[in-house]
Amino acid sequence: MNSFWIILFHTYLNKLKSKSFIITTIITVVIVLALTNINTIIGLFDKNGEKDQVAVLDETHQLYEPFKQQVNTINKDIKLTLYKGNEKEAEKAVEKGDIKGIIQLRFNKEKLPEATYKAMSIADSALHTDLQTSLQQVKTMLAASQIHLEPAQLKKLYEPVSFEKFALEKNAKTEEELNQARGLVYVLLFIIYFAVIMYANMIAMEVATEKSSRVMEILISSVSPIKQMFAKILGIGLLSLTQLAAFLLVGYFSLTRNMESLKEGFFGVYGFGDIPLATIVYAVIFFILGYFLYATLAAFLGSLVSRIEDVQQMITPMTMMVVAGFMIAMFGLGKPDAVFITVTSYIPFFTPMIMFLRVGMLTIPAWEALLGIAILVATITVLAIFGARVYRGGVLMYGKSNSFKDIKKALQLTKNE
Amino acid sequence: MVLKLEHVTKRFGKFTAVDDLSLTIPEKEIFGFLGANGAGKTTTFRMILGLLDTNGGRITWDGQAIDYSTSHLVGYLPEERGLYPKLKVRDQIIYLARLRGMQKNEALIELKSWLERFKISEYENKKVEELSKGNQQKIQFIAAVVHKPKLLILDEAFSGLDPVNVEMLKEAVLALKENGATIVFSSHRMEHVEEMCEHLCILHKGSPVVHGSLKEIKREFGKKNLVIHADFSLDSLRNYPGVVKTKTTMEGIHLQIEGEYIAEKILKEIVGKGFIRKFALEEPSLNDIFIEKVGNSYE
């Protein structure tokens, strides 16, 4: 087998078998499972689906029925019962835990309803807010009937106004589509961001470990440093794809299994129901290109340090660049057509995240995305050629080295004259 | 298959590390490569291996340049030891051997025989960081020779080893030579070089100050050592014409003299003065030559 493939698979398998890799993968898979099953989990802790029992002390003897109707339309999980005993007994029942709370209904001077709600704790704001809203509606109805409004008139009064939004640009995304895209882009941006930081770090550490343990000298006498560098970048790249594939598979199966229950919550708003294929394809392209860009950078930065302790210091500027790109992208989520976003999407170090954001959120001409990809590929090529030369000299340099002057020194080492 | 260095020069910026070095290293021999710290030995090795480009001159082996296409024929034990600390001995050696073009099975057989030879078979599945320094050194040596190289470069092969282990490795190096490997051997221990090398070179500030076969070098050096143990005072010999250096010991005196004829004169001088326990004329040691050649230019 060619030495390139030997290094590639050695790097890949070694990392794959390492404890830290297995643990991070398992933890992330658990998080993905938890997120996609969030409704089931919440239900599990919610007293096994029991309804909240609230006792009603109706002093008016008229409000109970309309109130109950309103509560039922707002939240089916609240069970109201008309309490026959007096207030003291009801309070005792709350203390014993038989019922969640009591609500006293009465009329004020203007013959309009008011209420007092008592419970052991009022931390469960969803419950008393629902009760309050229901009572508000009862009050509105009563007030309306007091000024003799017909129910039909009343209905008209409360009808929601029709407000439709249209984008004039052809193919522009509708409101619903935009929300959908925002959710998806948000998640994918996070994945790109974390993956780039994590794997670029891994490469820099890997190179620095080989250098600080001095095994590098044997390695470079067997295989050319350039071959090693690219074998390593591809090996870790393969590792990252393996890990991502594991997350996506688990996430996808878990999502499709729980689709029904999730449609109503967060996932409904951001509609992961039908994911546009183009967005996923662009995400993969920009993920891979972004990885190569930062991996190449990390490899040659890693080759400049002699001690593992210096790695973090060396790659901090690079990490900052990734963070900056991510921050701009987060800003861009709310305003993807800003000029600032358009400009930064052509700066190669930001392109993977910001161009992807634009592709995912806006309808931009294909050439713009392709131009971004072309800029990225060109930058990666230049960085790879330059990085390989630095790497070749850098791996032979020892001593106190944590400044960027060393790049010059490393280049000098590889020069003939 | 002769290793030839012709007018090799290496500069780092303004500093000249190796200056117009020409060497011929004969086949199937152990060649001693000596020099003080910073004389340019490691730089020369790195140029031979193709890790550094030369600023001038040519390095050829069997008439061809050494590059990555010949890396399966070359073995290298660097002065700065280094292995993957977290990797098991077995995985480590197999990985490094495969990078030198060896098959996995072949490498495993070879590894086992070396481990047996060094009496450390039980460490095959241990991580390198768990081994003692001496044993790590042996693993490092195995990593350099496991693929049966034709050209072997040993930079300070025996440093940091106890005498028993030094003997063990020395035998291994000699056995490799018998099997037809050309070995370039650097050491600060002159007695090792004297024992093992037929030809040698002493490098000083990037250029060779001594180069040739061990016998010739000693003959050309001319000076001899004279050891005298006697019951009477030998202090008068200190200023005897022809005596270069003196060193008083518990039992007598060590003299460095310009030639054999001085010894004859001294013998005549001291005969009859008292009982002479020892009067011995010795060849100069490599140590003496090294100190004279390298030490002189320090001044």
Image (cartoon, coloured by chain):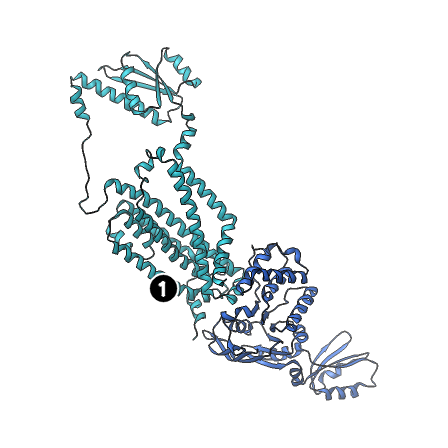
Vertical comparison of A11 with B194: above or below: above
Judge left or right: residue B194 versus residue A240: right
Observer able to see residue A77: yes
Judge left or right: residue A155 versus residue B88: left
Q: Residue at x 45, y 56 (%)?
A: A235
Q: Chain of mark 1?
A: A
Q: Could you tell me residue A130's position as x and y percent?
A: 31, 25
The image quarter in which residue B290 lies: bottom right
Judge left or right: residue A73 versus residue A197: left
Q: Which residue is mark 1?
A: A382
Q: Residue at x 19, y 41 (%)?
A: A166
Characterize the local packing of mark 1: few (<14), some (14-19) or many (20 or more) Cα atoms within 10 angstroms: few
The image quarter in which residue B82 lies: bottom right
User: Helix, strand or loop at disc 1?
Assistant: helix
Foreground: A160 or A324? A160
**Chain in cyan on the image:** A
Q: Could you tell me residue A138's position as x and y percent?
A: 25, 19
Q: Could you tell me residue B191's position as x and y percent?
A: 68, 73
Chain B, which colour? blue
Vertical comparison of A279 with A203: above or below: above
Vertical comparison of B154 with A252: above or below: below
Observer able to see residue B18: no
Vertical comparison of B281 with A152: above or below: below
Give the quarter of the figure containing the N terminus of chain B: bottom right
Q: Could you tell me residue A328's position as x and y percent?
A: 31, 50
The image quarter in which residue A379 lies: bottom left
Give the quarter of the figure containing the C terminus of chain B: bottom right
